[in-house]
Image (tube, rainbow, N blue to C red):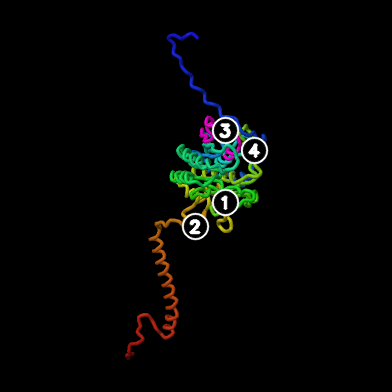
Amino acid sequence: MAALVGATVVVPTPAAAAPPTCGPVGEPGLTEMPWGLRRLEPSSAWPLSRGGGVTVAVIDSGVSAIHPALKGQVLEGRDFNNLPANKGQCDLVGHGTMIAGIIAGREGTGVPFSGIAPAARILPVRVLPDLKGTNDEALPGQVAAAIDWAVDQGADVINMSLTTLPRPELERAVERALAKRVVLVAAAGNRQENQQDRPGYPAAYPGVIAVGGVDEQGGHVGTSVSGSYVDIAAPGLNIVGPAPGGSGYRAEPNGGTSYAAAYVSGTAALVRAAYPDLDPQEIADRLERTADNPPDGHDADVGYGVVSPYRAVSSLLGTRTDPPAGALPAPTPQDDPLSAQRTAALWAAAIGALLVVLLLIARPVLARGRRRGWRPGRRTDSPVTG
């Protein structure tokens, strides 16, 4: 190859790699809005908040960046597993993409689907190569590292639709994230056949919003783990969401608390956008106090009840000692500019009433005096002279 003399060779900048196409393709032609969206009606909250400016990290199996519902919504993330070059945007099993779609899917794509917070952005963090058992001793450390990384990237909300083993490094990562004012939402866990319920982690750690599942009738999903740590509930059965390998949609008839957590993370994004000064505990408190509370206020199946995006954003709330959710605060006393005139009028009315009473008393006295010959100016008690 001949050398170029006197010429400047400019090395072109490599074009950005196209988002990978990987994972299940789903079915085309979604024609009916998923029942979870009909039940929660997130669009009623959108005039107040759409989640704009909020980043939700999805620590999961990856998130597709090419699906129409997620195109433009997915940031470059990180893969803590075996596909680092894909920056968290390859989802081989389809789980993380459904989760992200429920949280922040775009509306107006020609199908009756959207996320709860369509203006939020998704930060994909891949830690799950598949959906097999979560008893891998390496997983808690990976999830802990993923939490720390997402916090460093500026995540406002972290969704963890997974359960793993409770380990000190995971608990410390949770505490660090909460200290940085990051809202943490996690699946309460799914009951395994012929196994006793046990708390799901990281959901059971203090400060994490633990989410259980409900069905279309509002009842507790039988596979949703129960426990005193469950904070709130959301749709967790017969779930539909975007598939990673194209523009289709996948159905998950058995659902799970994974998907319920996504509905709550989307609602948390709405609240964080509307009330950016609230800390994670205050946001959790708002979600719980505006939920569809069960009769006892809290139970082990659904926590404080089913999340309500509209009420979570719109309700006027004070502290826990204030009136119930939605009650208006007591009016602030104000000076009355007509107080002097009102006082004078009251005195005038009182004096007038007193004069009327005196006249009524005096009338019979005067009549009796006339009958006895009394006249004005005449003293009836002086001696008579001739």
Query: Is residue 170 inside the magenta stretch?
Result: no
Please state the extent of the stretch shown in magenta in the rendering: 76-99
Question: Which residue in the protein does label 4 denote?
Answer: 250
Question: Which residue in the protein does label 1 denote?
Answer: 198
The three-letter code of the residue at mark 2 reads Pro
Cα gap from disc 2 to disc 3, whole angstroms:
48 Å
Find residue 346 and report its horizontal and vertical position in percent: 41, 65
Query: Toward which corner of the image does residue 262 lie, by quadrant?
Result: top right
Question: What residue is shown at x 39% (from left), y 57% (from top)?
Answer: 335
Query: Is residue 94 inside the magenta stretch?
Result: yes
Question: Which residue in the protein does label 3 denote?
Answer: 90
Instruction: Give the number of the mark in front: 2 or 3.
Output: 3
The three-letter code of the residue at mark 4 reads Arg
Cα gap from disc 3 to disc 1, whole angstroms:
31 Å
- Give whichever of 127, 64 is nearer the camera: 127
Q: Please report whichever mark, 4 or 1, sits nearer to the chain's N-terminal start.
A: 1
Q: Which mark is residue 323?
A: 2
Mark 3 Cα-neighbour bin, 10 Å: few <14, some 14–19, many ≥20: many
Cα gap from disc 4 to disc 1, whole angstroms:
29 Å
